[in-house]
Amino acid sequence: MHSAMHVAFCVLAASAAVIPALAASDGRAHAHEKGERVAAPAHSERLVIQGEPLQRLVDAAPAGAVLRLAPGRHAGPVRITRPLALTGEPGAVVVGSGNGSVIVVEAPGVRIENLEITGSGIDVPAMDSAILLRQTAEHALVSSNRLHGNLFGVYIHGAAGSRVENNIIIGRDDLRLAEAGDGVSIWNAPGAAVVNNTISQGRDGIFVKISRANVFERNRFSNLRFAIHYMWTHDSRIVGNRSRDNHVAWAIMYSDRLEIRNNISEGDRDHGLMLNSANYSRVEANIVRGGGEKCTFVYNANRNTLRDNWFEGCPIGIHLTAGSEGNVMSGNAFVNNRMQVKYVGTRYVDWSHEGRGNYWSDNPAFDLDGDGIADRPYRPNDVMDVLLWKLPTAKALVSSPAVQLVRWAQARFPALYPGGVIDSAPLMQPAIVPPTT
């Protein structure tokens, strides 16, 4: 009797020890199924020395393992088919063969950190990349890497919820623009985030298409075609990014319900901000300085709010065309642009909202009641501007007595205005003056 009770007690004790382990194991499996990142047990970490076969070690590693690459060159390509972490000590480099992608991820919850990665192929349709995240690679983390000499830096091909942060991505400058890849390219990856990266050279810094709920925040871009390029991507955020010396900073196309806020464009060759068929979006507190052609280009974009932006030192402050309707313009500062507004239309469009208009550096206004609003409406264009837009060769006559006479007459007889933009409550001072950088 005593012996039987002793056996039963031992069985119960063993069960008590096993059940938590099984529960923990089941929890890890459930997390893997959901694509969540799983912390690896300390005992599963392995140091990989230069010259060891990296693919063989990746294939042999258990789920949740950490492979830590020692300094030196490690031969790619590498394909990751289970959740694990691939990290590097200072000086660890993964080198591709010059064909295909260097690292291809096909499992959820993978981490790739602290590596230098180079040597992808140059096949654009094949998406040759330093790191290619396949559709099954949900919730991947690509962090603190240096990616250079690759066609694409990171290609998020359907890997929802993935995050690319704190990387330096340098594309190739030896390819034609049409043949070059992007720093980060995203297709159909809801919830993907690109945060605090430095991206230069190549085609676009970030190119996203057919996606939603993406976040692009605090990235820096230079020497690219477009810093950020949006196509058919909705309900997303572009916040706190900086673009310098690109063709276009923020090229937003065929996308709705975006938040575009606190971004800076300096010295971009064509436009700082372009809205092409972008609708129901909020464009607030952005700075565009020294654009080569237009600070802002709004083309067939409707029901957007442009508020408290700073447009300075461009040949054209804002060009609005192609039936853009229902946009709210308030609190913006148009400062020292050669032409503040280019708008061709027969209807009047009032650029003020709830008694608050915009600041115009060339508006010789008075404010006798001291309310901060100019006493007279402001019209940034006149009939001669319309003629000059339609007949560019007439610019040679812009200083002629005849042109000056027309402008004098129009100023005294407002009925001569052809329609277009009017600010019924222009501001005497800009809402916010950004620091000079």
Image (cartoon, rainbow, N blue to C red):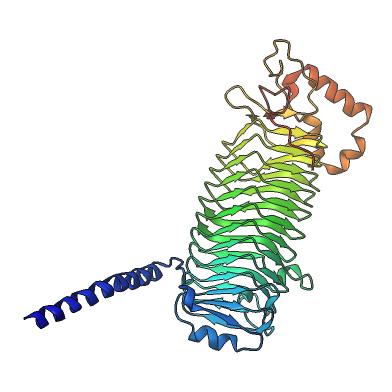
Q: Is residue 270 above or below residue 373?
A: below
Which is nearer the eye, 393 or 295?
295
- Furthest residue in direction top, as rendered: 369
Which is nearer the eye, 149 or 293?
149
User: Residue 420 lies in what quarter of the image?
Assistant: top right
Q: Is residue 182 above or below residue 275?
A: below
Which is nearer the eye, 415 or 430?
430
Residue 174's x, y, as percent? 79, 73
Residue 257's x, y, as percent? 52, 46
Is residue 275 in view? Answer: yes
In percent of the image, x 77 and y 35: which residue is there? Answer: 340
- Furthest residue in direction front, as rendered: 2
Residue 261's x, y, as percent? 62, 43
Which quarter of the rendering shows the C terminus?
Answer: top right
- Furthest residue in direction left, as rendered: 1
Which quarter of the rendering shows the N terminus?
Answer: bottom left
Is residue 277 in view? Answer: no
Q: Is residue 137 above or below residue 210?
A: below
In percent of the image, x 40 and y 70: which residue is there? Answer: 32
| 136 sits to left or right of 310 | left
User: Residue 73 lies in what quarter of the image?
Assistant: bottom right
Residue 278's x, y, as percent? 58, 48
Tag count: 0
